[in-house]
Amino acid sequence: MTPEGSRPEKYAARVLAWCGLALLIASPVWLLLTGHTSFRVSADEGRPPVSLWSAMLPALVGLVLTRLVPPRMAVIDPLACARRARVRGEMWVLVAMAVAFPVVLTVLPPEVVRGLGYAALKVALFLVVPLAAFRLLRGTGQRPRAVPVRVPRARWLFPLPAVVAWFYLSQVSVLAPPPVTADSLPDPVTLAVVSVVTLLTASVLEEFFYRGFLQTRLESLVGRWPAILVVSLLFAAMHLPTHLGSTAVITELATVLVFQGLFGVFCGYLWSRYRNIWMPVVVHIVVNLAYVDLLLGWLGR
């Protein structure tokens, strides 16, 4: 796949990518130097803190296995035959929505964007506006899909080593944080409603928006790794409004980059290499769904 973006776009993306890589490397160093080797990675009540190693090693191992299995694999650009003007216009709309989301969360009163308000804002900015923009910018001619509907069998099998290794290290091994307890969670009805909303608006919608929509367009314009790193920064930025405030700002920024940023890189590489969007969705479900944690605790993790 040869990216077909303009020279300024490629230059800007590479600068951002290098800055993102530098931040991803500097963040764990800062946390080690300041003694912050355990921290909270979720704003949800009842979620225990994780260690620096449990935040980093599963994603790093997953990245290595994603690269190795298989050793050679053709790079697929689902938007290769799309008009560059259309791809570029859609990309800028998506970037604007990715930036707008944390800004709106920061500006609006907390009571407005809590609970269902948070989910509604995400649906509006990550789904309604993008789909409207796609329709307006589509024009005539061939209309390739950014997220392929049919996934070949190999693209279900090849990601399994990386996903299984990530799951074991992050959820089952000694690196895994202690499971949440039932008494730390809301009542069963509330838990069920919250879990369904989270599954749809976080695990599914976020992966389609950040990886399927935005990253695919950036890849088509500026290349794989600049796209993955830029989108991972935007994905990490989405979590800043709900994570800042408990400790020093620089430490909070570092923890978000270590966990959400590196997690975004792993999910982004999974999507880019295998073009099976459901694999990063499954990984995201495991991280967000309380029932997974409860089940593992019941099984004696």
Image (spheres, rainbow, N blue to C red):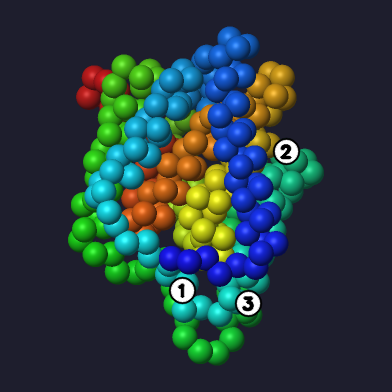
Please, what is the three-letter code of the amino acid marked with disc 3?
Ala
Ranked by sequence position, the earlier of labels 1 and 3 is 1
**Please, is residue 243 above or below residue 195 in the view?**
above
Q: Is there any visible trace of residue 117 in the rendered image?
A: no
**Please, is residue 65 above or below residue 6 in the view?**
above
Q: Which quarter of the picture shows residue 251?
A: top right
Please, what is the three-letter code of the amino acid marked with disc 2?
Pro
Please, what is the three-letter code of the amino acid marked with disc 1?
Ala
Q: Which quarter of the picture shows residue 180?
A: top left
Mark 1 crowdedness (10 Å alpha carbons): few <14, some 14-19, many ≥20: some
Q: Secondary structure at mark 1?
A: loop
Of 175 and 109, nearer the camera is 175
Q: Which residue in the protein does label 1 denote?
A: 80
Cα gap from disc 1 to disc 2, whole angstroms: 42 Å
**Please, is residue 103 above or below residue 59 in the view?**
below
Q: Is residue 290 left or right of residue 125?
A: left
Q: Which residue in the protein does label 3 denote?
A: 85
Q: Which residue in the protein does label 2 denote?
A: 110
Cα gap from disc 1 to disc 3, whole angstroms: 12 Å
Q: Which quarter of the picture shows residue 179?
A: top left
Residue at figure coordinates x 32%, y 27% from the top left: 169
Q: Is residue 191 left or right of residue 42?
A: left
Q: Secondary structure at mark 3?
A: helix
